[in-house]
Amino acid sequence: MKKRISISTAPNSPLVVKNLKSLTEANRAVFHLEKTTTALCRCGQSQNKPFCDGTHGKIGWSSKKQEGRQQRRVDDYVGKTITIHDDRGICSHAGFCTEDLPKVFRMGVEPWIDADAENAATIIKTIKKCPSGALSFSVDGVLYDKFSDEPEIRITDAVALATASLIAIGCIQAKVCHTGTCPAGIATQNPQLRQLFDEERALTQFKNFYTATNSELKIFARTNGVNDVHKLTVSDLITDSRIVADFTDIPHV
């Protein structure tokens, strides 16, 4: 009989995963788990991410919700063929919804969801991308809020340009994205806070950042004797981090 996969939490403690066979890394490589029970970092400070190394206890990390964080509440946005459910309290602001369907998920507009702005099939496809579970939907009175046949955990911290891109457009690393009270006006739907975000300036800074990054990558490629970054391989890289070396094929120096 197949053992049930579970993820559980306890106050001020890591995520405890049971009976999961593997983790999927950002590059889609599969990392097999040898133990039946695995503790994953929840405080964000482990030196052996994604695994817990006990740092949460040393730094006195608390899992208590921060003051002012948006409370959990499911709001319903009823359309002619589909009803979209939204729980702002658990939104991770990944942005798949607003990027894929800006006419449905409207930044800075109330109500912020228009369930009739696209056909139901297209909306459902985007809702299924929501990594936090904040979005779900109902059709003909039936609720759909589970979109995976097999439970899995995917590690996305390896996407190095994500944080750099946010900083380029004005992120000040306040680390309150999950509260919806971003002081830079980026990770929020509060109309007053959104006014703090200068879109024209952000677009210019974003373009400058990627232009400079592209230029530096070309220089790096030429330094390694190739004329195209796509010709670079892992053998062109080294790292002074034992953690990076342990989780990748990049040799340690």
Image (cartoon, rainbow, N blue to C red):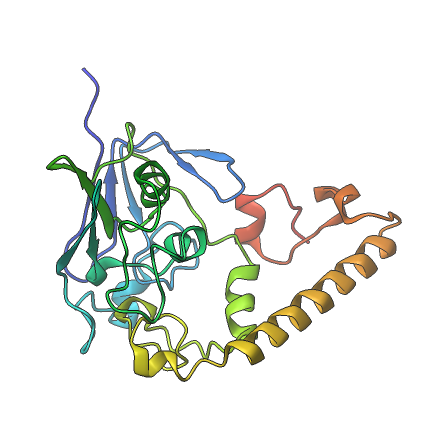
Q: Is residue 27 above or below residue 213?
A: above
Q: Is residue 33 left or right of residue 235?
A: left
Q: Residue at x 56, y 78 (%)?
A: 200
Q: Is residue 139 above or below residue 236?
A: above
Q: Is residue 88 left or right of residue 24?
A: left
Q: Residue at x 14, y 67 (%)?
A: 71
Q: Position of residue 230 (x, y in %)?
A: 75, 44
Q: Residue at x 14, y 34 (%)?
A: 140
- Quarter of image, res 194: bottom left
Q: Is residue 94 left or right of residue 84?
A: right
**Residue in the foreground of this view, choosing between 74 and 168:** 74
Q: Position of residue 179 (x, y in %)?
A: 26, 70
**Residue in the foreground of this view, choosing between 53 and 222:** 222
Q: Position of residue 150 (x, y in %)?
A: 29, 28
Q: Is residue 139 above or below residue 109?
A: above
Please identify the residue farthest to the left as the structure is shown.
141
Q: Is residue 159 left or right of residue 46?
A: right
Q: Position of residue 251 (x, y in %)?
A: 67, 46
Q: Residue at x 29, y 68 (%)?
A: 58
